[in-house]
Image (cartoon, rainbow, N blue to C red):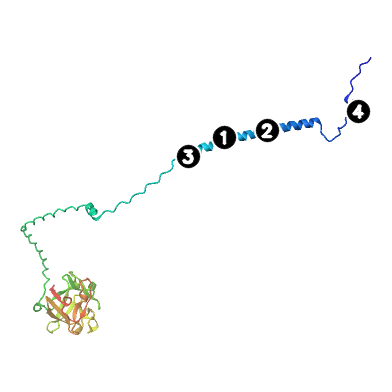
């Protein structure tokens, strides 16, 4: 008898197809799965609750013990004692506390005054020897005036100034002035008598005469050199004064004068109201 082969699943399914269960309740497997899940959830919830109780219990006990320890160890601060005010010292105590002033020693006795010793007077200073004047320099007195003699005129403002023709000029209008005395012909003048008592013309070695500019009668008019012409503006009267002479214009009556009594080189010479001061006093030295 031939061996029967097993039925295939397809053949069996076609012969007996599966039919879905009908009804409201699920199958047994569903209930098994739901029960297992509920049991696991209950176990987890109980475990969490137990763990929470344990932890909360530990936390509650620890701070209580710690606070108790702090309470025992921290003593309450004692109030600071109030400072008692110091009593004010009485007048007697303050008087006693004042330091006694030290007595100052008496001032030292002054040093004895040194005995005055007679000092020997210093030797007298040697007076400087006067420089000898040149042989031809002679202060001429009035009675010794020599007509046509040559002289130089020195103002009384200083000892080393002379009447001088500016730059030894020979032209009309050349000014005369005060200058340092030297040996030039610009300071030499010949006295020519006019025939009147003590009246002269002063002639420069260039041939010109001392002249009042413009024959002026005014105080302050200039004096210069001009061609000799015989006018009164070129005639001068010599009158003794101090250690010399005043030189008076025969025309205006004014005196030959160093302007402002200057001692400077180049100071101008003009005619001015006679006052017989050193600026108008002239010494004559024979040349």
Which one is earlier in the sequence, the residue at label 2 or at label 4?
4
Query: Which mark's residue is nearer the viewer, 2 or 4?
Result: 2
Q: Which residue is mark 3?
A: 71
Is residue 193 or residue 276 the one in the foreground?
Answer: 276
- Which mark identifies residue 14? 4
Residue placed farthest to the right in the image?
1
Residue 8 drawn at (x, y percent): 89, 24
Mark 4 crowd level (few <14, some 14–19, many ≥20, 10 Å Cα): few
The correct choice, above or below, for 129 with respect to 189 in the image is above
How many marks can you see? 4
Distance from Cα at disc 3 to Cα at disc 1: 20 Å
For the question of whether residue 230 can be seen, the reply is no
> Which residue corresponds to the image point at 62% horizontal and 33% vertical from the top-left?
51
Distance from Cα at disc 2 to Cα at disc 4: 48 Å
Which one is earlier in the sequence, the residue at label 1 or at label 4?
4
Residue 253 drawn at (x, y percent): 18, 84
Q: Which residue is mark 1?
A: 58
Which one is earlier in the sequence, the residue at label 3 or at label 4?
4
Distance from Cα at disc 1 to Cα at disc 2: 22 Å
Left or right side of 242 for 70: right
Is residue 140 or residue 167 the one in the foreground?
Answer: 140
Mark 3 crowd level (few <14, some 14–19, many ≥20, 10 Å Cα): few
């Amino acid at each position: 008898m031939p061996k029967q082969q097993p039925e295939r699943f397809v053949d069996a399914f076609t012969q007996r197809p599966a039919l879905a269960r009908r009804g409201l309740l699920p199958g047994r497997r569903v209930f098994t799965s739901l029960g297992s899940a509920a049991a696991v959830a209950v176990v987890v919830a109980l475990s969490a609750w137990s763990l929470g109780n344990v932890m909360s219990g530990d936390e509650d006990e620890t701070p209580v013990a710690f606070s108790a320890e702090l309470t025992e160890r921290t003593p309450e601060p004692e109030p600071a004692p109030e400072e008692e005010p110091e009593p004010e010292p009485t007048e007697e105590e303050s008087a006693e506390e004042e330091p006694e002033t030290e007595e100052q020693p008496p001032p030292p006795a002054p040093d004895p005054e040194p005995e005055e010793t007679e000092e020997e007077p210093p030797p007298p200073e040697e007076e400087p020897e006067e420089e000898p004047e040149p042989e031809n320099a002679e202060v001429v007195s009035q009675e010794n005036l020599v007509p046509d003699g040559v002289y130089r005129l020195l103002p009384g403002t200083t000892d080393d100034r002379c009447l001088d023709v500016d730059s030894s000029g020979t032209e009309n209008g050349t000014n005369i002035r005060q200058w340092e005395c030297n040996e030039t012909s610009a300071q030499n003048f010949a006295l020519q008598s006019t025939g009147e008592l003590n009246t002269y013309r002063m002639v420069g070695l260039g041939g010109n005469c001392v002249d009042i500019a413009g024959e002026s009668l005014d105080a302050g008019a200039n004096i210069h050199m001009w061609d000799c012409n015989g006018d009164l503006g070129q005639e001068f009267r010599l009158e003794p004064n101090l250690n010399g002479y005043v030189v008076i214009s025969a025309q205006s009556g004014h005196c030959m004068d160093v302007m402002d009594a200057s001692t400077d080189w180049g100071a101008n010479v003009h005619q001015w109201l006679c006052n017989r001061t050193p600026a108008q006093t002239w010494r004559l030295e024979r040349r």
